[in-house]
Amino acid sequence: MKAARVGRWTALIGFFGLFFVILAFTAVIAPPERLPRSLVLALLLGPLLFPLRGLLHGRRYTHAWTSLLALFYIALGITLAAAPAERLYGLSMLFSAGLLFAGALLYIRGNRRPA
């Protein structure tokens, strides 16, 4: 059960880190030039709102599909990190999404049901 607890906290830290990285960079640090901020925030933060309740309540199924959602943000972070102007944003997103992914998998593995 200790692995499940560490995994859950790692997933929550990664989730809220990803949420605040996207919010900070999109709203304040590097706002988009061509699109409205509200549209970009809705597209990037909207999918993160769906698993919030399940992650906070420690639901195993929610952690499972949130790990798949984290892969999208990992791919986006890699894409942004490739551009020199967006490197810090991409690496921050990549790190937070990686924490979310690893924590969710660790929670699922540590919280197995007996066969």
Image: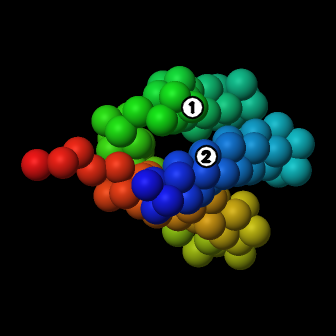
Task: Look at the image and name its color scheme.
Answer: rainbow
* Dot placed on the residue nearer the N-terminal end, 2 or 1: 2
Above/below status of 80 relative to 26: below
Q: Position of residue 48 (x, y in %)?
A: 54, 34
- Where 107 falls versus 77 (above or below)? above
Q: Picture quarter containing residue 32?
A: top right
CA distance for labels 2 and 1: 8 Å
Type of amino acid under label 1: Leu
- Say whether residue 51 is visible: no
Question: Which residue does the numbered mark 1 point to in the structure image?
Answer: 56
- Contact (Cβ within 8 Å) of mark 2 with mark 1: yes
Check the image and name the residue furthest to the right. 28
| Within-10-Å neighbours for mark 1: few <14, some 14–19, many 20+ | few
Instruction: Give the residue pinned by disc 2.
Output: 12
Image vertical order of residue 78 relative to residue 11, above or below: below
Q: Is residue 94 left or right of residue 32?
A: left
